[in-house]
Each structure stands twice: as C-alpha cells, then as structure tokens.
Amino acid sequence: MSNGATVRLRPIEPAEAEAHWRWNNDPEVMRWFSTGFPVSRTRFIEGYADRPPNSFERTVLGIETVHDGRLIGLISLGDTAHEIGSADFDIYIGEKECWGKGYGTEATRLACRFGFDTMGLRRIQLWVADANAAAIAVYRKVGFVEEGRARRTLRVHGVWHDMVLMGLLDDEFAALDAVPSAD
Ligand SMILES: CC(C)(COP(=O)(O)OP(=O)(O)OC[C@H]1O[C@@H](n2cnc3c(N)ncnc32)[C@H](O)[C@@H]1OP(=O)(O)O)[C@@H](O)C(=O)NCCC(=O)NCCS
C-alpha cells in the first residue's frame, strides 16, 4: 500500500504473529523499549486475530522488503489526537541482519508520507532513548528535530537514560520530501 524503492508498508496478517512475537522477545531488538510484563507465545498468537483493525486512532503496518517480499519489522502511528492532528510514531526492524541497509529510514519516510498525505496529520512525534544512536540518526535524516526530553525515564541494564521527544511538522516534511534525498 505504501511503496518505496527498497521497502513497502502493508498490513500484517494474523498468520505472521509468530514473527512479531519472536521480535518482541529478542532483547537486542527491544533494548530501548519498556517492554512491560512478558506475554506467552500462545496467548500472543491467539490474540492476534482479535486485534482491532487499523484506524485513524492507531495503525500498525508491516515493513516488507521489495526484493524478496520478506516481513522484517513494523511501524505504528498511534494515540492520534484528532483535535491537533498529531500521532505518535514507532518503528522496529525485528530481523537484525536487516539493520544498517537503509530500510528503517525508508520505512520511516513512507510512514510519515502516509500520516501527512493520507491521514492529514499536522505533526508526528516520537520518544527515543538518548543512547539509541541508530534510531536518532534515522529520525534526523527524515527531518525530525528534538523538542524536549524526559530525564532518567528508562533504565537499561542498571543505567538510567533520558527519553528524547522528537517531532516533525507537515510543512517541514513536505519541504524535505520534495527534495530527492542523497542517502
Ligand atoms: C532503529 C532502526 C529502526 C534503524 O533501522 P535501520 O534500517 O538499521 O536504519 P538505516 O539503515 O536506515 O539507518 C541507520 C543509520 O544509523 C546509523 N547508525 C547505526 N548505528 C549507529 C551508531 N551506533 N551510532 C551512530 N549512528 C549509527 C547508520 O550509520 C545509519 O545512518 P547513515 O545512513 O547516515 O549512515 C533499527 O536499528 C531497529 O529496529 N532497532 C531496534 C528497535 C529500535 O530501537 N527502534 C526505535 C525505537 S525509538
């Protein structure tokens, strides 16, 4: 549904729940997330078919590679606030051998295009751990800027980290998206 040169975004099928569960239980993938309480594989997979359909309030899409049609991760736009046209963005690529190939950057760009052009959002925001250098690099490349930080709100292996609030506005994205990128 959203096609790029190297990845596309499309809905996730219930039959793909197993991959989603595996990613959620990979400590390297989830290193910078607050994961909450563990969920059993059976419960996770059984509950997948009952997930609410994608909507303005919350949309979850799989990231699929163009060259071999493999599902490698997901993005979400959620907690959408109608009155200000703002949504929270999240991404992860669960197949770790796919990191560092530009997929995250293109998927983020496609998600922002979907949010601004199709959903009519005015701003997209996200929270990222201050030490998550790869994610911050991706967000900066797409045009997100730091808007604030919540100090010492994530603890990873005993070390406290700040969570950085980054935001992107529709006109800023339109200006950047119109310019062919060098990456
Ligand atoms: C964050 C994530 C989505 C990035 O996806 P990706 O496909 O690896 O990203 P890309 O290849 O498009 O770009 C990664 C950029 O980070 C840079 N990078 C990677 N590791 C880095 C590091 N340790 N320090 C600085 N920059 C780093 C790369 O050089 C690249 O930038 P460049 O193109 O300018 O060279 C992916 O690593 C991931 O899913 N991580 C686990 C989940 C996660 O942290 N999600 C974000 C939550 S806020």
Image (cartoon, helix red, strand yellow):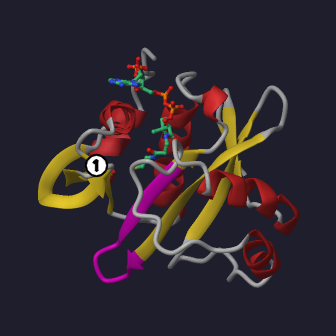
The residue located at (76%, 60%) in the rendering is: 12
Instruction: Name the element at disc 1.
Output: strand
**Is any part of residue 50 visible from this angle?**
yes
Question: Between 41 and 121, which is closer to the camera in this rendering?
Answer: 41
Q: Is residue 109 inside the magenta stretch?
A: no
The residue located at (56%, 41%) in the rendering is: 107
- Residue 128 as seen in the image, left or right of residue 138: left
- Residue 128 as seen in the image, left or right of residue 152: right
Which quadrant of the view contains residue 61? bottom right
The boundaries of the magenta stretch are 80-91
Question: Between 135 and 144, which is closer to the camera in this rendering?
Answer: 135
Question: Between 67 and 152, which is closer to the camera in this rendering?
Answer: 152
Spot occupied by residue 131 in the image (x, y as percentages of width and height): 26, 39
Residue beneath disc 1? 129
- Amino acid carrying mark 1 in the image: Ala
Quadrant in the picture for the C terminus: top left
The residue located at (68%, 83%) in the rendering is: 52
Q: How many numbered dots are placed on residues in this image?
A: 1
For label 1, the crowd category at 10 Å Cα-Cα, with few meaning under 14, some 14 to 19 and many 20 or more, is: many
- Residue 99 as seen in the image, left or right of residue 138: right
Q: Is residue 88 inside the magenta stretch?
A: yes
Against 123, residue 28 (above or below) is above
Spot occupied by residue 3 in the image (x, y as percentages of width and height): 68, 40
Label 1 residue near ligand 1, CB within 8 Å:
yes
Spot occupied by residue 46 in the image (x, y as percentages of width and height): 82, 79
